[in-house]
Image (tube, grey):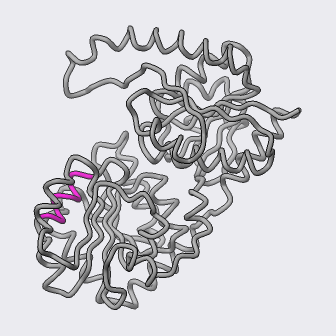
Amino acid sequence: MSKKIIIAGGGTGGHIFPAIAIAGALRKQDPGIELLFVGAKGKMEMEKVPQAGYTIEGIDIAGLNRSSLIKNIGLPFKLVKSFFQVRGIIRRFMPDAVVGVGGYSSFPVLRAAQAKGIPTFIHESNSFAGKANQWLGKKATAIFVASDGMEKFFPAGKIKITGNPVRANLAKNAVSRDEAIRFFGLDPARPTVLVTGGSLGAKGINEAIAAGVDEFGKNGTQLIWQTGKPFAAQAADLCKGKPLIWTGDFITKMEYAFPAGDVVISRSGAMSIAELCVARKAVIFVPFPFATEDHQTVNAQHLVNKGAGLLIKDSEAKEKLVATAIGLLKDEPRRRGLEENIDKLAVTNADEVIAGEILRAIEL
């Protein structure tokens, strides 16, 4: 008899895309499996999960707003309401297991499942685990992590080092560089920089690119610039009349974006790094400076130490980023060295390993 599994979490692509990858591997290993996603109403999972072909139910939950305390007044009520909603979802769906991938909606779903004795699994993509996951980890069946040293956050006996799941269309990407660059309406004969600030954009990176945007044309260099929604209109205005630049708020087909970039500028969240390793790219990392315990800098430095990436601080991006990217494009031996070293860190089957572990555990 086929199993029923809830996958809970979201908020950013770094949580959603691994969840979708795990879902695909579960369905491949058990074609009759029933999968249900649970996410936060109003967040990007409510759009991205149905696009991937899965059903999702939304709950009323939000995180702490650190910039405006007045906006937090309704939080306790939302949390209580979300627990009632989750209990209803679990009662109707009757899952054999619940998988949490991080994000606001992950916590009440796993907490409710654990209270009912349903096996729970956590995927922790980062090198620094949040408080909610640490707490949930005490009662979890297994915890899937990307790197060693996670015993300081979770019970050692429950940890399984799997790497981070990468979207199937990236892990098995067959798009050529020429095809990819033409997809963006650009010229395959020219060197190209890809800028991706994650699914929600990156203010520091965007401001640095905006400050030096004319340098790309002066050097005969093309730019593919994914801005995120907040900066999209400003970037579009800046790039009017510049035929060597493609700009947009979101790139839906990253399987075209990665092959197109000879040099990539990126934040250093765990999932971005996992995808860039698989894509075998020369990367300049600009860590998000306000990440918990500055874990994005830790992530990026790990690659820098292995000769697998460059690092520029967010605070120095406006002065250094564009010049460094153009310089790296012109330095082919250095670029090739970065590509070879990052390729050694690639993990392409984490989704299959995680799915297999989940199915084996609930069959016991």
> Camera-side residue: 48 or 362?
48
Magenta stretch: give its range: 202-210
| Relative vertical location of residue 326 with respect to residue 300 in this rendering, above or below | below
Residue at x 48%, y 21% (from the top left corner): 59
Image label count: 0
| Relative vertical location of residue 111 with respect to residue 28 in this rendering, above or below | above
**200 lies left or right of 341:** left
Residue at x 38%, y 79% (from the top left corner): 182
> Camera-side residue: 19 or 175?
175
Q: Position of residue 35 (x, y in %)?
A: 68, 35
Q: Position of residue 43 (x, y in %)?
A: 40, 34
| Relative vertical location of residue 84 with respect to residue 360 in this rendering, above or below | above
| Secondary structure character of the magenta stretch overall | helix
Q: The N terminus is located in which quarter?
A: top right
Q: Quadrant of residue 190?
A: bottom left
> Camera-side residue: 243 or 342?
243
Q: Position of residue 2 (x, y in %)?
A: 84, 35
Q: The C terminus is located in which quarter?
A: top right
Residue at x 34%, y 43% (from the top left corner): 291
| Relative vertical location of residue 231 with respect to residue 143 in this rendering, above or below | below
Query: Is 311 covered by the magenta stretch?
Result: no
> Camera-side residue: 197 or 310?
197
Q: Position of residue 231 (x, y in %)?
A: 19, 52
